[in-house]
Image: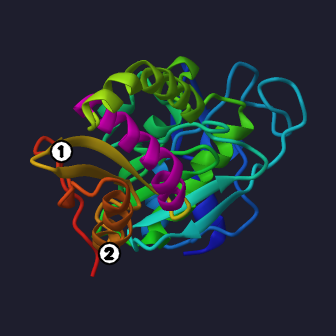
Amino acid sequence: MKVSTARHASRRAFAVLSGRTIPASSVLRPARAAATSASHVSSLASVPCFTVGGSSSSSNRTAFGSQRRTIYVIAEETPNPESLMFYPQDHDVLGTAAKTKTFTDKASAQGTSLLATALFKVHGVASVMLGARHVTVTKQTDIDWTLVQPNIELVMSQFFAAGLEPMQKDLIERFGDGERRMRDARADGIEESESTGAASPEEFERELLELLEERVQPFVQQDGGDVEYVKTEDNVVYLKMMGACSGCPKSGITLNIQIKELVQHYFPHIVDVREWVDPNEDVIPRGH
């Protein structure tokens, strides 16, 4: 397919935001050349475009009237072949010390995250995890990254160039707030724990959450993943693997060796650490 044909096809793509419809050809994308295969061009029809007010007929200005500029998006591999991390240049996603937020489908993102909702419009996206400075996208296993990655970069470039908020600010949780609450709660209960010679279940859970936040989550987030505490039952800790950790062929090593050894070092009574699989969620197959 000729490049001119690809451009003509992309001009037919339309998306709606805040009641406005604008052509895909009027927004910017990273300077890296996009694939021009027939399957890639056809998939552009589902890529949303973003603007807030202003005229879509202007080819050189944003909706705010300032000179339009490209927001470059950098993709980085993860240990999971089905997941990539995407960093918008010079932009945070959820911001410093923010806890990650995972969305497993479009319905879970609607009303909470405009960015995640937009990314689910890209054909092949299976899940989206928003982090402090990056977005981890996991694709469906039967689709190649060459058909998904350019559209994700396009959506994110348009999104941040439009100055939109990735997620409702009042729904973003931050580590600092939780640590202060845990320290206050621990101070209230420490005298009772010392008098009985053993930590109460509530005290154990607070200590475990603090360990996960300080020692485990920063480690797994470097590879585009995250872990979430679910419960402790019969001295077994259950953790939910998220982002690149979900379905990753190496997540078993991370969980059974690194995390398990760390947890058992601080809590010798724990006999095992296992992955929690929500029966109400679709499981993303592990790569091989």
Magenta part of the chain: 200-221
Q: Nearer the viewer, residue 88 or 192?
A: 192
Whether residue 238 sits left or right of residue 223 in the image: it is left
For the point 37% across and 55% down, the residue is: 266
Amino acid beneath label 1: Glu
Q: Position of residue 118 (x, y in %)?
A: 48, 39
Q: In terms of sequence position, does the residue under pointer 1 or pointer 2 come before the other?
A: 2
Q: Is residue 206 magenta?
A: yes
- The label number, if any, that marks residue 195 in the structure image: none
Residue 81 at least partly seen: yes
> Disc 2 marks which residue?
253
Disc 2 crowd rating (10 Å Cα; few below 14, some 14-19, many 20+) is few
Q: Choose top left, top right, bottom left or bottom right for residue 95.
A: top right
**Can you say whether 263 is above or below 202 in the image?**
below
Amino acid beneath label 2: Ile
Q: Position of residue 142 (x, y in %)?
A: 28, 70
For the point 46% across and 62% down, the residue is: 148
- Inter-mark Cα distance, 1 to 2: 23 Å
Q: Position of residue 79 (x, y in %)?
A: 44, 74
Q: Where is the N terminus found, in terms of image quarters?
A: bottom right
**Can you say whether 121 is above or below 123 in the image?**
above
Disc 1 crowd rating (10 Å Cα; few below 14, some 14-19, many 20+) is few
Q: Choose top left, top right, bottom left or bottom right for residue 147.
A: bottom left
Q: Nearer the viewer, residue 69 or 45?
A: 69
Identify the main secondary structure in magenta: helix
Residue 46 at least partly seen: no
> Disc 1 marks which residue?
281
Q: Nearer the viewer, residue 213 or 185?
A: 185
Instruction: State the SS at label 1.
Output: loop
Q: Position of residue 164 (x, y in %)?
A: 65, 29
Farthest residue, direction right = 67
**Can you say whether 181 is above or below 90 in the image?**
above
